[in-house]
Image (cartoon, rainbow, N blue to C red):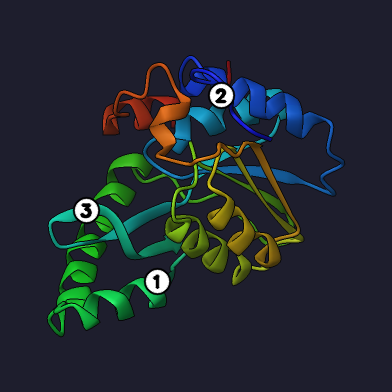
């Protein structure tokens, strides 16, 4: 679906409501759990979980950004229930190495992001155990897909935990990211695929940063 003329969503909550309505028309099999990718995916996922009347949890993913270009994803790391996965953007790494990316850069950034991942896990959960994913239909939600590296890491770690199905659901995404992810999952729902794709934030009127405190508040408050 093309995005024509202006932003599609007022904010992440608005996007989550629209995504929840779309997902309500899908026959997702079995016992469903919604996982938001912090930070920006959590307010979207909360609206989806409310609409579907199912549990909400987080799957923490950290992008491994290129030096000086943090939004350019060399890969990503994710962890859930003690399982840790690293995903590499091999084509981009090869291109950057050909133009002088030093050896060991990926590994140094990976170590830093794993430390931040552990910090967020402690901050968001506050001792609360992750929701079990074994035998459940897992809907992975983010506020959008640009390169898709973070979501690929999330899908990979979830599939190692024995779900009955894995669905990726986002308000907006690039054609390339959606096409790369589709063979990895049972279903992919993307409300908007703008042409040309510039950035996730262009689909929102308000794309202000989601804070750690906001994520924690959403996870520890009753569904709305």
25 lies above or below 88? above
Asked if one can make out residue 11 in the rendered structure from this viewpoint, the answer is yes
- On the picture, is 156 further left or further right than 89? right
- The residue singled out by tag 2 in the image is 15
x and y, in percent, of residue 3 in the image: 59, 28
- Mark 2 closeness class: few <14, some 14–19, many ≥20 residues within 10 Å: many
Disc 1 to disc 2, how far (Cα)? 28 Å
Q: Residue at x 19, y 54 (%)?
A: 69
201 lies above or below 198? above
Numbered disc 3: secondary structure: strand
Numbered disc 2: secondary structure: helix
- Mark 1 closeness class: few <14, some 14–19, many ≥20 residues within 10 Å: some
Q: Looking at the figure, which quarter contains the N terminus?
A: top right
- The residue singled out by tag 1 in the image is 89
- On the picture, is 76 further left or further right than 152? left
- The residue singled out by tag 3 in the image is 70
């Amino acid at each position: 679906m093309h995005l024509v003329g202006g932003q599609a969503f007022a904010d992440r909550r608005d996007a989550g409501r629209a995504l929840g309505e779309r997902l309500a028309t899908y026959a997702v099999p079995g016992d469903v759990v919604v996982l938001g990718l912090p930070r920006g995916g959590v307010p979207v996922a909360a609206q989806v979980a409310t609409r579907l009347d199912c549990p909400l949890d987080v799957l923490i993913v950290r992008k491994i950004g290129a030096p000086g270009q943090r939004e350019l994803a060399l890969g990503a790391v994710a962890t859930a229930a003690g399982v840790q996965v690293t995903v590499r953007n091999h084509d981009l790494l090869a291109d950057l190495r050909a133009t002088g990316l030093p050896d060991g850069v990926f590994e140094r950034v990976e170590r830093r992001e794993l430390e931040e991942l552990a910090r967020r896990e402690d901050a968001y959960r506050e001792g609360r155990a992750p929701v079990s994913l074994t035998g459940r239909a897992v809907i992975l939600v983010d506020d959008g897909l640009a390169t898709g590296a973070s979501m690929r890491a999330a899908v990979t770690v979830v599939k190692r935990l024995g779900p009955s199905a894995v669905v990726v659901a986002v308000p907006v995404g690039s054609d390339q990211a959606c096409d790369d992810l589709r063979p990895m999952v049972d279903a992919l729902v993307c409300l908007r695929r703008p042409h040309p794709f510039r950035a996730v934030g262009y689909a929102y009127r308000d794309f202000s940063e989601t804070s750690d405190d906001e994520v924690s508040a959403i996870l520890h408050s009753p569904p709305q």
